[in-house]
Image: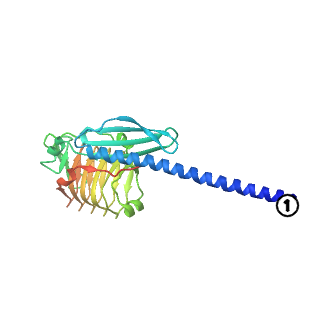
Amino acid sequence: MLPLLLFLMVCSSLVLFFGRRVYQESEAAREYLHRKQLETIAQSFMHSAIRQEKDTEITNAAYYLPPLQPGNSEVQLSVSVNRVEDLGMRFLKVNVSDSGPEVFSLRQCRMVFPVSMLQQFAESPLIVTGSALKEKSEEKDNDTITSKSYGAVFPQFSVEGIAVWASTDFPSALELQRDGLSGWIYLCRNKSEIPKGLQVNGNGILAFADDVMIGDYTEFTGRIIILADHGLRIGNHVRLNKALLFCRGKLTVGTDSIINGAVMAQQDVVVEENTVISSDREVLEPFNSIISY
C-alpha cells in the first residue's frame, strides 16, 4: 500500500510541476503576443501618420481601440506633437497602452525648413547675426567675421527643449566610429569633445547644451545637423561633408578645414587659415530621423 501511495505522490508532483511549467510558458507567450500587438498598433499608426502628413497636419490626440485578445484588455493610443517653428522641426510621439502596466512608445522627428530660412541661406553659406563689425584677431592674423548678413534672423530654439525628444544618449567615440549616426538624434548636456581622427558615417542630428570641440582630422561623411547652445570649435583638417550648423555662441573653425553645407552663428565666427565654407543646398532639404523606441 505504501509503495502505491509513494507512486501516486510522485505522479501528482510531476503533474503539478509540468502543469505549472505549461502555465508559465502560456503566460509568457500571452504577454509576448500582447506586447507585439501594442508594437504593431504603434508602428502602423506612426507610419500611417507620416505618410498622410503632407495632406493633414498631425495634432495631439487620444483614441480608444477595440480590446486586445486574448485577455480582453482595453487599449488607448495617444499622440503627442511638439514643434520648433523657426527650425521647421516636428517631433511626434505615439504611445500605446493597455489597461495594465504595458506601454509601447515610438518617436520620430521631421525637419522641413521654413521659407524664411531658405531665403537667408540663398545668398551665402555663412551667416552671422551678431554685431555689424569686421575685426582682425590680435592673436593671429585671422578674420573675425561679425557682420550682420542680409538682415538674417537667428532661429529661436532650445536644446533643452529638444532633449525629451532625443533618440538616445550621446554615444562614446568608439560607438560613433563603429556605428555612425544611423539617423538618430543625439543630445549632450555637458562640455564635450569629439576625439581626433574619427571618421563618422551616416546621417543624424547632434544637439549640444554646452561648449563642444570637434577634434583635428575628424570627418563626418554623411549629412549632419549640429545645434549648439554655446560655443562650437571645429579643429584643424576637419571635414564636414554635408553639414548644417546652428551655433548660439562663438564658432571657431581651425586651419585647413572644409565645411560643405550651411552655417549660421548668433555671435561671431573665427575662420582660420586655408579653411573653406562652401554652399550645399542639399543640407536644407527635409530631414527625417529614424523611428526610435
| Residue at image mark 1 | 3
Q: Which quadrant is the N terminus positioned in?
A: bottom right
State the image quarter where residue 7 is shown.
bottom right
Secondary element at image label 1: helix
Q: In this view, does 12 lie to the left or right of 77?
A: right
Residue sitting at x 39%, y 64%: 178
Q: Is residue 190 visible?
A: no
Residue sitting at x 35%, y 35%: 61
- Residue 142 position in % (x across, y down): 20, 54
- Residue 159 position in % (x across, y down): 34, 42
Tally of numbered discs: 1
Q: Nearest the camera: 171 or 131?
A: 171
Q: Is residue 162 left or right of residue 279?
A: right
Q: Is residue 154 above or below residue 144?
A: above
Residue sitting at x 42%, y 45%: 105
Q: What residue type is labelled 1?
A: Pro
Near mark 1 (Cα within 10 A), the count class, few <14, some 14-19 or many ≥20, is few
Q: Nearest the camera: 257 or 14?
A: 14
User: Outermost residue, right direction?
Assistant: 1
Q: Is residue 77 above or below residue 185?
A: above
- Residue 233 position in % (x across, y down): 30, 53
Asked which colour scheme the image uses, the reply is: rainbow
Q: Nearest the camera: 184 or 252?
A: 184
Q: Is residue 54 left or right of residue 122?
A: right
Residue sitting at x 21%, y 51%: 285
Q: Is residue 97 visible?
A: yes
Q: Nearest the camera: 118 or 153?
A: 118
- Residue 103 position in % (x across, y down): 47, 43
